[in-house]
Amino acid sequence: PSLLHLWDRGGAARRTPLGSLTLGWSVLSVLVSLGISSVQGLVIRHPLPPAVAWLKANASAEARLFVWGQDPHIYLDSGLRPASRYFASFPLTGYAFGTPEGQDPRFDTSNRAAPHAWENLARDFERHPPDFIMDIDAVRTVPRYPVARFPYLDRLLNQEYLPVFRGADGLVYQRRHDAGVQVPGPIPRRSGPGRAAERVDAASPRSGCRRGAHRSTLGGRRDPS
């Protein structure tokens, strides 16, 4: 706003040395800030957050990942290829950037979701099913977009995935070695209750996990979130 105000002052400020210097410094500051943000987005974080570190240590180089949440940096940190065109979940949820409602779980943003986004996601998963799904919303104190509210993804996790690691940065699911390459049918309005999760004992080439890796650090039932 200050920069726009300076620019809109009829050009008077730009015609003085001080005005030109101020404007130039403001523009330079903005460009430097944008440049730093861009570079930071291309640098792998050290140390890695725990769930990302688990993926890095246990997933094969050919594995594909889908991240449920707003952190596309996870793909770079883990070194895994995305399983979908959606690097972040806002086209699926309608997440509103820069507004108080964007963080309010009670505010429904479904009308902001991109047209046909869920159909596109299903087609992406049909072409290359994700070996891992990382839910970063599940570890929030109050999840903004709990998976249970999205029938397609909730049913997919219940039927074809097992929780294998939970860290402060997210809950990791791994695709069952006996899961079929299929896309669930028409998306229902409501999903059924979660099913019991089994402990994963052995690696499988189809699972996207490195042979010999200890794949599961979770036992019992799937996390309700």
Image (tube, rainbow, N blue to C red):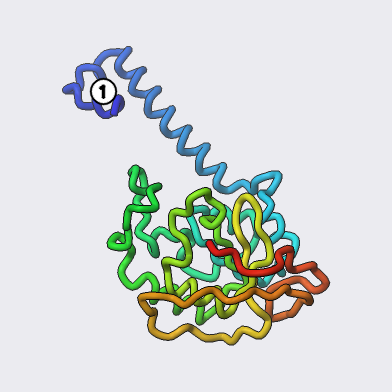
Quadrant housing residue 199: bottom right
Rendered location of residue 109, percent (x, y): 32, 57
- The residue carrying pointer 1 sits among few (fewer than 14), some (14 to 19) or many (20 or more) residues within 10 Å by Cα, namely some
Q: Is residue 87 left or right of residue 4?
A: right
Judged from this view, the residue extending furthest toward the left is 10
Q: Is residue 204 left or right of residue 7?
A: right
Quadrant housing residue 145: bottom left
**Residue indicated by mark 1:** 6
- How many labels, in total? 1
Rendered location of residue 121, percent (x, y): 44, 73
Callout 1: SS:
helix
Q: Residue at x 51, y 56 (%)?
A: 137
Q: In terms of depth relative to the viewer, which is nearer, 188 or 65?
A: 188
Vertical placement of residue 34 versus 104, above or below: above
Q: Residue at x 19, y 22 (%)?
A: 9
Q: In terms of depth relative to the viewer, which is nearer, 38 or 47?
A: 47
Q: In terms of depth relative to the viewer, which is nearer, 189 or 36?
A: 189
Rendered location of residue 208, percent (x, y): 68, 74
Q: Residue at x 58, y 76 (%)?
A: 195
Location of the N terminus (image quadrant): top left
Q: In terms of depth relative to the viewer, which is nearer, 79 or 112?
A: 112
Q: Amino acid at mark 1?
A: Leu
Q: Residue at x 65, y 79 (%)?
A: 176
Quadrant housing residue 65: bottom right
Rendered location of residue 193, percent (x, y): 50, 75
Q: Is residue 20 left or right of residue 211?
A: left
Vertical placement of residue 57 versus 73, above or below: below
